[in-house]
Every structure is written in structure tokens, then in C-alpha cells.
Amino acid sequence: MYINIDMPDKHEYDVIDVNSQVRIPGIQEANDETGEFSIIMKDCDTGEWIDKWNSYSKEFDLVIFKFKGNIKIIKKGE
């Protein structure tokens, strides 16, 4: 299954790390067939979202971190 942040029903799903059975927060997109997922994270010291300056748009963009792991997308409440 594949989900991404732009899907209208994305909030109905959780992405779980199969090894630890822990929900992965900040998911932007995930594919449990390939194990690939991307997240945004907060800075541990400041609690602010991690971002970087985009010199083209003259704005800050969130940094997306990409990972591959043993994940499962489940519908909440199941």
C-alpha cells in the first residue's frame, strides 16, 4: 500500500515499524511494499521543524528525510 500527505484520507492510516511495533510520526509518504518512507522531523533542542533556506523561493522549506525499513501501513482502529 502507498500513502502520501496529499491523500484526503491519509489521517486514517498509521505507519508502523514492524520490528518495534512503534508508530512512525511525521510521515510524508510511505510504501510498505518497498519499505521506503519519508518523514519530517523536529529539532530536539528547539522543538522547531527542521528546515533550510531556499534561495530560489526566498522561503524556508521543510527538510524531508528518506528511509527504508520494515514498515506496515495500517488503518487506524484495526
Image (cartoon, rainbow, N blue to C red):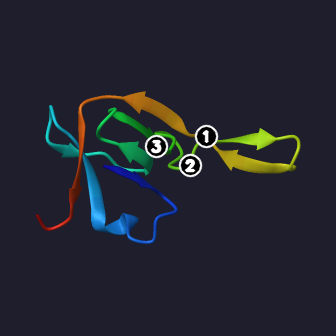
**Observer-nearest residue: 62 or 18?**
18
Report how far apart the C-alphas of labels 2 and 3 lie in the structure: 11 Å
Q: Where is residue 10 drawn, in percent x and y? A: 38, 64
Residue visible at 86% across and 50% down? 57
Marks 1 and 3 in Cβ contact (< 8 Å): no
**What residue is drawn where x is 87% and y is 49%?**
58
- Please say if 33 is above or below 3: above
Question: What amino acid is labelled 2 in the image?
Answer: Trp
Q: Residues within 10 Å of mark 3 (few under 14, many from 20)?
A: some
Q: Residues within 10 Å of mark 2 (few under 14, many from 20)?
A: some
For the image shown, how many numbered marks are present on the structure?
Answer: 3
Residue at 21%, 62% (x, y): give it: 75
Residue 71 vs residue 46: left or right? left
SS category of the residue bearing label 1: loop
Q: Dot 3 lies on which element?
A: strand
- Sequence-first tag of 2 and 3: 3
For residue 49, the mark is 2
**Mark number, residue 8:** none
Image position, residue 27 (x, y; %): 41, 49
From the image, state whether disc 1 or disc 2 is nearer to you: 1
Q: Earlier in the sequence, mark 1 or mark 2?
A: 2
Q: Residue at x 16, y 37 (%)?
A: 18
Residue of label 3: 39
